[in-house]
Amino acid sequence: MPNRPIHLATSGPAGVAFAYYKAPYTNDIQRLQEVVGGALGGLLGGLLPDLCDPPRHPGHRAVAHAVFPVGLGATAWIGNLDSWQKDLRDRADEYTRRQIQADDPILQALYGLLALVFRMLSGMLAGIVAGYVTHICLDFTTPRCLPLIS
């Protein structure tokens, strides 16, 4: 039966892979930043189902583990992911431009940090859904399986 270590061991790499896939037109540094965000998002996504439906007993699976709501949520998330990532990448690019134009070293550092944060958030959004779906797929293989609705 999958437990927290197994979920983390699978959801982190799933977040990395999906973040890498969703960042095809970035340069290597930007892609690395998104992949790191994807790893963090994957770990978070892998924990979310059990944070929403805590595993206090074998029958803990409710809405956060139910096939139909999770499928709808993941479909909606992935359907909006490209536009969300575009917005975050645009913000990261804007802060990179500001960093280049700034004369003050403190502002340069601040703008660089903000660009990094927005780039990592872009990857995190991909990682969260990949980690969550990975958790659900693993739990689907258990004897208890998953509820359809709740």
Image: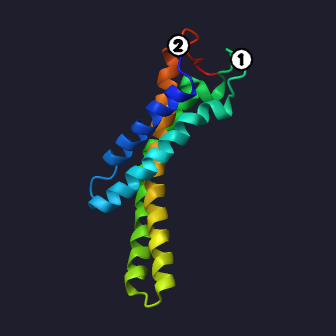
Circle 1: residue type = His
Disc 2 element: loop
Q: Position of residue 87 (x, y in %)?
A: 45, 62
Disc 1 element: loop
Q: Residue at the right extreme?
A: 56
Circle 2: residue type = Thr
Question: Residue 48, which numbered label?
Answer: none
- Left or right: residue 104 versus residue 25 is right
- Left or right: residue 125 versus residue 24 is right
The residue lying at 39 percent from left, 43 percent from top is 16
Query: Viewer-proximal residue, 31 or 76?
Result: 31
The residue lying at 48 percent from left, 56 percent from top is 121
Is residue 107 visible to us here? yes
**How far is the residue under mark 2 from the one under mark 1?**
14 Å
Q: Is residue 136 above or below residue 43?
A: above
Q: Which image quarter holds the N terminus? A: top right
Which residue is label 2 attached to?
142
Quadrant position of residue 99:
bottom left
- Binning the other alpha carbons within 10 Å of mark 1 as few (below 14), some (14 to 19) or many (20 upward) gives few
Q: Position of residue 108 (x, y in %)?
A: 45, 81
The residue lying at 50 percent from left, 83 percent from top is 107
- Left or right: residue 17 versus residue 9 is left
Question: Residue 57, which numbered label?
Answer: 1
